[in-house]
Amino acid sequence: MKVVVAHNRYREAIPSGENVIVDTEIGQLREAGVEVIPFQRSSDSIDTMSAARKALLPISPVYGADAQRDLAAVLRAERPDVLHLHNPYPLLSPWVIRTAHAHGVPVVQTVHNYRQVCSSGLYFRDGHNCHDCRGKLVGLPAIKNRCYRGSAAQSAIMATTLALHRPTWRSVDRYIALTDKIAAHLTDYGIPADRIVIKPNGLPDPGTPAPLGEGFLYGARLSPEKGLGLLLDAWRQHPDGSLGPLRIAGDGELRPLAEAAAAERSDVTYLGPLDRAGMVAARQASAVVIAVPTWEDVLPTVILEAMSSGRAVLGTAVGGIPYMVGTGPAAAGWLAQPDPASLAAALPVARSGAATAAAAARVRYQEHFHPGVLTPRLIAVYTEMSSTLPSRP
């Protein structure tokens, strides 16, 4: 089995769970004997481009001429069985699907967000969930609200790209939906159910969990949709020190909120941005990992990391988080509604039940998110696709 994995990497300065998942999946496939040819571009390269190439960037989401030329050369030289696409924006473009089909190569795509419909990919703007572009041929609300990078011009290009590539997206041979919510998003978009497979991301097994630590860890990009403000509003409803320590890791526009909370309360510590080793240490020092986005987060990597490490999860009941955490006695933790009162009520419950839920979290990881479970399922998708001719727009 030979697979080209296509991915436009997000900037390394901003931690990306998607980058981590792509790298991890490539490693898992290689360990299973699959020959993987990465075809990747990085948004970090934009800063070093010539003025002439930068001038062409606005149209790269539509076509991406350099990427199509380079991909065609790879496909001719390698003759892969499948092309597996992750993120195409901005340097690859969905046109890589057409390029693969032109060379007789079927395409599998893992859907990490809602970018088929939403220009930002989040279904979130101005502090609230938004579906204004759903069902529209052209996402005019995205242009009006500057949803892509805060620019009306760039939003117009992205909305146009999504409209022009509707037939392209509908030609993908097999979609991998990370959760049932993503599968529903795809069927709503018009993808037949028999072309969708639900398969979550997984992470390598870090081994026997370290002894349980104390308190809570919140580690995320410090942006409004990730729920830092929600968490702090809920935390302040309890007396200082009554819940144990809260550690906050990450960076972003809401960093001043984290710094102010740490200055205000003795039970809050702001750790700043951490590398992977730093996050491992912070998880080991904690008992519960908090993931409380207010947007419809698809499959937060921080929850996978928590469960694999034997740490309970306190999450909001949005997006794919209920799918990940589960329900009943075998749940990996607790779910709260994305409002301060609901989250405040869940915090002491999580503190007292951390040990029991931590054990259940580790079991849930092993049964549902371990590479030994997921990698054979992915290879089965490849095998099925490699035995068929690709669909056509």
Image (cartoon, rainbow, N blue to C red):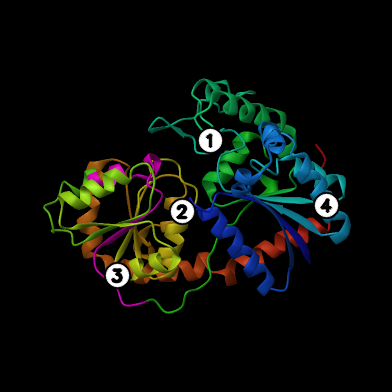
**Residue appearing at x 43%, y 51% in the figure:** 321
Give the labeled residue for mark 4: 105
Residue type at mark 3 is: Ala
Seen in the image, is 25 located left or right of residue 2?
left
What secondary structure is found at the residue carrying circle 4?
A: loop
User: Mark 1 and 3 residues: CB-CB less than 8 Å, in contact?
Assistant: no
What secondary structure is found at the residue carrying circle 1?
A: loop
Label annotation for residue 285: 3
Q: CA distance from mark 1 to mark 4?
A: 29 Å
Within 10 Å of disc 2 (Cα), the crowding (few <14, some 14-19, many 20+) is some
Give the labeled residue for mark 2: 300
Give the labeled residue for mark 1: 120
Q: Earlier in the sequence, mark 4 or mark 2?
A: 4
Q: Is residue 184 above or below residue 105?
A: above
Residue type at mark 1 is: Ser
Within 10 Å of disc 1 (Cα), the crowding (few <14, some 14-19, many 20+) is many
The range drawn in magenta is 210-232
User: Mark 4 and 3 residues: CB-CB less than 8 Å, in contact?
Assistant: no
